[in-house]
Image: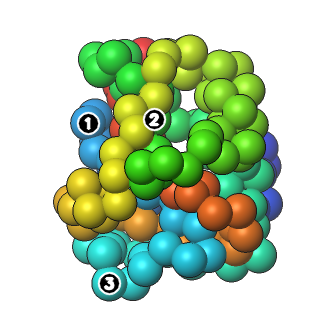
Amino acid sequence: MLTGINPVISPELLKILAEMGHGDEIVFGDGNFPAASHAKRLVRADGHRITELLDAILPLFPLDYAVDYAAVLMNKPGVPEPAVWSRYRETLERYPDGDKEFVVLHKPEFYERASNAYCVVATGETERFANIIIRKGCVK
């Protein structure tokens, strides 16, 4: 057992976070995201919301300083910005390099990028268009 690790981080997710290197990306997919078919490595986090998982991992996971965005999000043309995105902004801004803009991709481009990510985390997130990709930086 470890101390100081948020209990929503499973041993499998903790291992993945430790394995990732600078520039590797991790996807947190909402409940509708086809995680298993797009994952090189799949971690299940059923029952957890994405903001809950971000709050748990970001104290351990440095965001990448070398890019001009904090996260990559998915939306489709004509759909207004989902409410969950403001919660992502609030969460990410509490951490170094989390105050940058978001990159928004349409579904096909997002799915392609997700397929190239180091890992996909399948969550219990119920909000639509809540999928998010973050990129690991260097531990300073």
Residue 11 in the image, given as x and y percentages of width and height: 59, 68
What amino acid does circle 3 point to? Ser
Residue 39 in the image, given as x and y percentages of width and height: 32, 74
- Of residues 23 and 33, the one nearer the viewer is 33
Relative side of 54 to 129, left or right? right
**Which of marks 3 and 1 precedes in the sequence?**
1
According to the picture, the residue beneath numbered tag 3 turns out to be 37
Distance between the alpha carbons at the discs numbered 1 and 2: 12 Å
Task: Determine whether label 1 and label 3 are within 8 Å by CB.
Answer: no
Disc 3 on helix, strand or loop? helix
Disc 1 on helix, strand or loop? loop
Q: Residues within 10 Å of mark 2 (few under 14, many from 20)?
A: many
Disc 2 on helix, strand or loop? strand
What amino acid does circle 1 point to? Gly
- Of residues 59 and 71, the one nearer the viewer is 71
Please tell me the numbered disc located at residue 4.
none
Q: Residues within 10 Å of mark 3 (few under 14, many from 20)?
A: few
Looking at the image, which residue is at 77% across and 76% down? Answer: 47
Distance between the alpha carbons at the discs numbered 1 and 3: 22 Å
According to the picture, the residue beneath numbered tag 1 turns out to be 23
Looking at the image, which residue is at 73% across and 26% down? Answer: 90
Kindly indicate the quadrant of the structure image that contains residue 96.
Answer: top right
**Which of marks 2 and 1 precedes in the sequence?**
1
According to the picture, the residue beneath numbered tag 2 turns out to be 71
What amino acid does circle 2 point to? Ala
